[in-house]
């Protein structure tokens, strides 16, 4: 089997021809045990595996692919990459909100709900990315202040917004849904962009500070 970790052949003594991609992933994690690195990407036959396909791919035999590669990185780098992607997805969801609002105003309810369900998925992933990212970086959501507001408040605000929107969709309350679309969501999403920018800037500062400290330690006699 051609299994790699950061472009280098992975030691695969514990694997055989029936081993799954998941088993290879565990072997890669084991090889990183004495480091501060973590796996943040998987490629099969030089194609990056999307988060949506990851579970399915992990259950497949590794021998099914000509090449399986795991990509590692420092937690801060992994989190920054995920948050930047989340920031882009969040910006794209403004279009989904506009589409849903227009469809609802024209009586095309099914289209409006479809657009909002897609947006809900993006926002739920954004919430998860932030929570998991903070845990990986050891950031206290109660102590980190962004634009004068604790990160925990930002998170709770989004969770409440998601619950309200989901409730309106499930109850098919078109009046409430229209009010949320017209008066609340744009402001909520703009606030979340501010929050994500603040988190990204905070992690970047920490990463730059750690790098500078490491360089200083390296040259100190």
Image: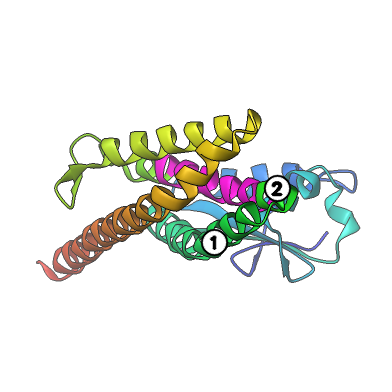
Q: Nearer the viewer, residue 198 or 41?
A: 198
Q: Is residue 169 magenta?
A: no
Q: Quadrant of residue 193?
A: bottom left
Q: Is residue 7 visible?
A: yes
Residue 98: image tag? 1
- x, y percent for residue 153: 27, 36
Which residue in the protein does label 2 denote?
A: 109
Q: Nearer the viewer, residue 80 or 118?
A: 118
Q: How is the image coloured?
A: rainbow
Q: Is 118 part of what is drawn in magenta?
A: yes
Looking at this rendering, what residue extends furthest in the left direction?
221
Q: What element does badge 2 sit on?
A: helix
**Front in this rendered view, residue 32 or 139:** 139
Find residue 49 and report its horizontal and vertical position in percent.
Answer: 71, 59
Question: Which numbered marker is on residue 221?
Answer: none
Instruction: Give the label, 1 or 2, closer to the camera.
Output: 2
Identity of the residue drawn at 64% across and 46% down: 117
Mark 2 or mark 1, which is nearer the start of the sequence? 1
């Amino acid at each position: 089997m051609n299994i790699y970790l950061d472009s280098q052949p992975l030691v695969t003594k514990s694997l055989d021809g029936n081993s799954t991609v998941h088993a290879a992933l565990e072997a890669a994690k084991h090889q990183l045990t004495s480091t501060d690195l973590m796996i943040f990407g998987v490629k099969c036959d030089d194609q990056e595996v999307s988060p949506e396909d990851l579970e399915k791919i992990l259950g497949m035999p590794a021998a099914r692919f000509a090449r399986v590669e795991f990509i590692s990185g420092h937690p801060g780098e992994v989190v920054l990459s995920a948050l930047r992607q989340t920031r882009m997805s969040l910006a794209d969801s403004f279009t989904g909100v506009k589409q849903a609002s227009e469809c609802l105003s024209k009586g095309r309810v099914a289209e409006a709900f479809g657009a909002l369900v897609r947006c809900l998925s993006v926002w739920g992933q954004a919430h998860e990315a932030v929570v998991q990212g903070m845990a990986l970086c050891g950031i206290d959501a109660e102590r980190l202040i962004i634009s004068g507001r604790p990160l925990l408040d930002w998170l709770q605000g989004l969770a409440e917004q998601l619950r309200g929107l989901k409730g309106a969709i499930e109850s098919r309350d078109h009046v409430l849904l229209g009010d949320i679309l017209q008066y609340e969501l744009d402001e909520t999403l703009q606030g979340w962009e501010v929050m994500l920018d603040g988190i990204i800037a905070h992690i970047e500062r920490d990463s730059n500070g750690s790098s500078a400290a490491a360089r200083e330690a390296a040259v100190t006699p």
